Image (tube, rainbow, N blue to C red):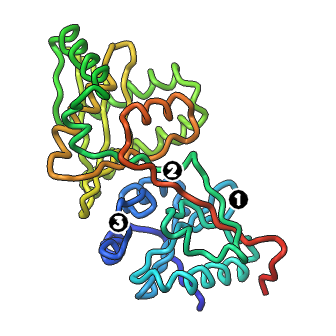
Amino acid sequence: MELAFRNLTLDDKKIFDKYSPHLHEPYGCEYCFPLIFIETIYDKTQICDVGDMAFIRTEWSGRRIFFPPLLKDTALLPLAIDIIEQACIHEGKPIEIRMVPEAMGKLINTEKYLVTENRSLADYIYKAEDLIHLAGKAFHSKRNFITRFHKEYSNHEFREYDEATDRGNIMKLLEKWETNTTHEKWATENKLIERALLFYRELDLKIAVLYVGVTLVAFSVNYIGNSDTAYTFFEKADTDYVGVYQTINQHTAEMFFTNTRLVNRQCDMNVEGLRKAKLSYHPFAILNKYKVQHKPDCDTN
């Protein structure tokens, strides 16, 4: 089967919606259309829907990378993998499928394909009620930080995003964050945030902002899926303000996630501090991700 790929557009959300009833729970970021659309900052993400399955691919550092296929039935997975492989052979590219969720990874033929875990891309899944209430001994320190923030910055304001008022202030916060970070991917992440702000209405993103006086000290960008899983795409704060991350996290959950069951806060990118922070919120599950490649000793013809 020859795949007729085209560039991903906003209208392709309906393709993801078509397949969403057939996905495993909890839902990984690889199936979240708004996030994938935001990440098309270089216009290299393409899609092809053939009816019972759909394929998404992109380019990164000169490599052709496929997302896990969207399927109406998991029984179609062997055929879908074969179609991806043939498409790669046709283009003279090695097969490489990333962000494959654990449930799908277990169904792939390991005699033919090399399936390796990528811990840095594992999604952290939380119970929404835990993030909202921070109940119990496990979250005692989180509650203390929020209480301290409220006491020290009594003139704070938390609310939904207003583009006219807040966009420029978010960019100022990002500029400050850049000067203080050693995170090597900050430039790419900032481009993603800018794209999220550009299309937030079309993608129905939920953005929260936190001010102390007239200074924006934190913001978060979120999406409520049409399943019972919500997503936090970005969360940035000025750490000069004690308790600011704990406060933006809890207030966002209380504002947006009261009618959802789970919250996907994405991966830790193998950043030690980020991993520690995500684990400190006691995830309900860590959704492991895998990379699929062809074994070098297998014939691809």
Q: How many marks?
A: 3
Mark 2 closeness class: few <14, some 14–19, many ≥20 residues within 10 Å:
many
- Numbered disc 3: secondary structure: helix
Q: Which residue is denoted by mark 1 in the rendering?
A: 62
x, y percent for residue 76: 49, 85
Q: In the rendered image of this protein, does residue 7 appear above or below residue 87? A: above
Q: Most extreme residue toward the right, as rendered?
A: 297
Check the image and report above or below for 117 versus 110. Answer: above
At a point 40% along the width and 31% down the height, the residue shown is: 280
Q: CA distance from mark 3 to mark 2?
A: 26 Å
* Mark 3 lies on residue: 10
The N terminus: image quadrant: bottom right
Q: Quadrant of residue 255?
A: top left
Residue drawn at 22 percent across, 8 percent down: 152
* Mark sitting earlier along the chain (3/2): 3
Residue identified by numbered label 2: 122
Q: Nearer the viewer, mark 3 or mark 2?
A: 2
Q: Quadrant of the C terminus?
A: bottom right
Residue found 43% across the figure and 35% down from its top: 278
List the single residue furthest toward the top: 152
Q: Position of residue 247 (x, y in %)?
A: 26, 25
Name the residue rendered at 36%, 49% in the picture.
264
In the displayed image of the protein, which residue is found farthest to the front? 137
Amino acid type, residue under disc 3 in the picture: Leu
242 sits to left or right of 160: right
Q: Relative to the observer, which residue lies in front, 210 or 291?
A: 291
Residue 125 visible within the image = yes
